[in-house]
């Protein structure tokens, strides 16, 4: 999985209206956490709606390597027989996490306070991403790690033989770092405390509570203070995974910029720490509504209806909203290209260290397609050209980044000329049915030489 096969260039052509129902896959963040917490509980956890993309499947394989029994039933339900908190066994081989930044960082946290060793690697993109932001706080528990510069993969972690609880303030808003520390705190005595000056997605806290951990979150002058009591016996759960808002962003956004479109995207998780894009689109004037609002498995859920929106305007996106939509800025920049005026995005330096430097990747690709972009270290501006105003016609580099690839394919559906991404294969990490789903709505997507 750490290797990368032949490139798969994919072209999106200008299409007619996108219409119908878009059944996007399960939420990737919740899918990762369901497998990991199921493996750390005692008994049988059953998971319905798990995202069966490469990233999540890699996490399932890793849980097996640490001793949990993880299987998929014939009806698509996943069953995890856990080993309990602190019960991980030492893997016999290297843990290959493919492209899964969330997976590897959460798994490191989950094993950091158990006295075992494990070596982690991944594909070229994951091996280029910084891991010191995870290994540094895990060292406070007593874990040791040995990797390349800045803690890059391949990396070997040796879990703390006598873990101690920690009190840790996040230096940057990162749900991955927060979650890694909380998962490490499960097998440490006493109380582990994480302070986040700026709130990030809270799936880990919600799910830990659901699995029976004692965890509180209080808003204070320091920020959000999360306190976890260590060494609980986690109780297995039955989980219905909501559909992924980050995946929903693509059919929603494509519908907003493609003339005549009307698309329904059902059962989307609308956790307030994840839904920033949809509120931003509404602020821009998008015809985007939430229908049948409800709660499932402790998470707010609704059906999204997106219609072509020719009157959208550029806005300044509130910087405090960045953490709730950090993965959605690439597709937002595509929508901004079809709005009137300038869209300003600030407080987004985290985009520089994702699967690729997403600010640079989108800026280069948008400029190649005729869109004006200005950028700084933690901000960027996109000057919109109005509905049907983007020339398109370029071939862009996806940089082994699934969200970059999907964003430019959505651009191609509404641009004047077709847009090609040099390699669409990374899309399988998070949205393996992207092409078939978009084609079912009316999009024209074709592989080169197909």
Image (cartoon, rainbow, N blue to C red):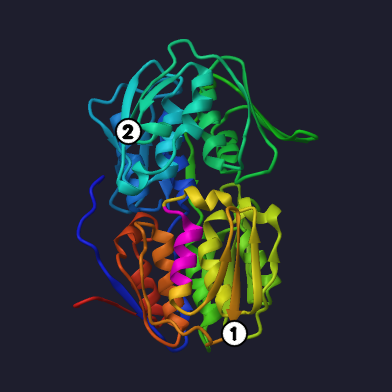
Sequence-wise, the earlier of marks 2 and 1 is 2
Q: State the residue lying farthest toward the right.
A: 221
Judging by the rendered image, the residue that carries numbered circle 1 is 386
Residue 81 is marked as: none
Residue found 37% across the figure and 78% down from its top: 394
- In the rendered structure, the answer to whether residue 306 lies left or right of residue 47 reads right
Determine the image quadrant of residue 81: top left
Spot occupied by residue 216 in the image (x, y as percentages of width and height): 68, 31
Label 2: element kind: strand
Q: Is residue 60 visible?
A: yes
- Main SS, magenta region, reads helix
Q: Percent from the top left, x then y, of residue 146?
A: 36, 24
Which residue does the image show at 57% across and 20% down from the upper left? 230
- Residue 231 lies, with reference to residue 294, above or below; the image says above
Of labels 2 and 1, the one closer to you: 1
Q: Secondary structure at mark 1?
A: loop
Give the labeled residue for mark 2: 120
Can residue 38 be seen in the rendering of this structure?
A: no
> In this picture, which residue range is highlighted in magenta?
356-366
Q: Residues within 10 Å of mark 1 (few under 14, many from 20)?
A: many
Is 324 magenta? The answer is: no
Left/right of residue 84 with respect to residue 181 in the rendered view: left
Looking at the image, which residue is at 34% across and 42% down? 127
Quadrant of res 92:
top left
In percent of width and height, residue 86 lies at 43, 20
């Amino acid at each position: 999985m750490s290797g990368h096969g032949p490139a798969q260039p994919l072209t999106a052509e200008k299409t007619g209206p996108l219409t119908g129902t878009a059944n996007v896959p399960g939420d990737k963040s919740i899918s990762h956490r369901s497998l990991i917490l199921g493996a750390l509980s005692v008994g049988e956890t059953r998971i319905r709606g798990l995202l069966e993309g490469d990233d999540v499947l890699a996490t399932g394989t890793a849980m097996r390597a640490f001793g949990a029994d993880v299987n998929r039933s014939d009806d698509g339900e996943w069953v995890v027989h856990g080993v309990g908190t602190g019960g991980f066994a030492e893997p016999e081989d290297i843990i290959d996490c493919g492209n899964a930044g969330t997976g590897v960082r959460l798994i490191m946290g989950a094993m950091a306070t158990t006295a075992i060793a494990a070596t982690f690697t991944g594909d070229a993109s994951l091996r280029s991403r910084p891991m010191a932001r995870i290994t540094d706080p895990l060292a406070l528990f007593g874990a040791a790690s040995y990797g390349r510069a800045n803690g890059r993969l391949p990396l070997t972690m040796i879990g703390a033989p006598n873990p101690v609880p920690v009190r840790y303030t996040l230096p940057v808003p990162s749900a991955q770092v927060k979650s890694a520390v909380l998962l490490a705190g499960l097998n440490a005595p006493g109380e582990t405390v994480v302070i986040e000056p700026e709130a990030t997605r809270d799936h880990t806290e919600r799910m830990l509570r659901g699995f029976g951990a004692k965890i509180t979150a209080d808003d204070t002058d320091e920020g959000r203070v999360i306190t976890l009591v260590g060494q609980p016996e986690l109780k297995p759960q039955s989980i219905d995974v909501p559909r992924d808002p980050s995946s929903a962003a693509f059919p929603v956004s494509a519908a907003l910029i493609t003339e005549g479109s009307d698309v329904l995207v059902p059962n989307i998780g609308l956790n307030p720490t994840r839904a920033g894009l949809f509120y931003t689109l509404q602020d821009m004037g998008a015809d985007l509504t939430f229908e049948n609002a409800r709660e499932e498995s402790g998470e707010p859920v609704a059906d999204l209806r997106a219609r072509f929106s020719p009157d959208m305007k550029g806005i300044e996106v509130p910087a405090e909203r960045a953490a709730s939509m950090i993965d959605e800025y690439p597709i937002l920049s595509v929508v901004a290209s079809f709005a009137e005026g300038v869209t300003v995005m600030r407080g987004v330096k985290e985009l520089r260290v994702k699967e690729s430097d997403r600010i640079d990747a989108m800026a280069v690709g948008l400029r190649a397609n005729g869109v004006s972009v200005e950028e700084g270290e933690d901000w960027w501006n996109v000057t919109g050209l109005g509905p049907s105003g983007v020339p398109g016609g370029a071939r862009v580099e996806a940089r082994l980044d699934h969200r970059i690839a999907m964003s430019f394919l959505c651009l191609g559906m509404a641009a004047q000329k077709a847009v090609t991404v040099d390699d669409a294969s990374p899309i399988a990490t998070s949205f393996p049915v992207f092409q078939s789903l978009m084609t079912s709505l009316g999009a024209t997507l074709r592989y080169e030489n197909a």
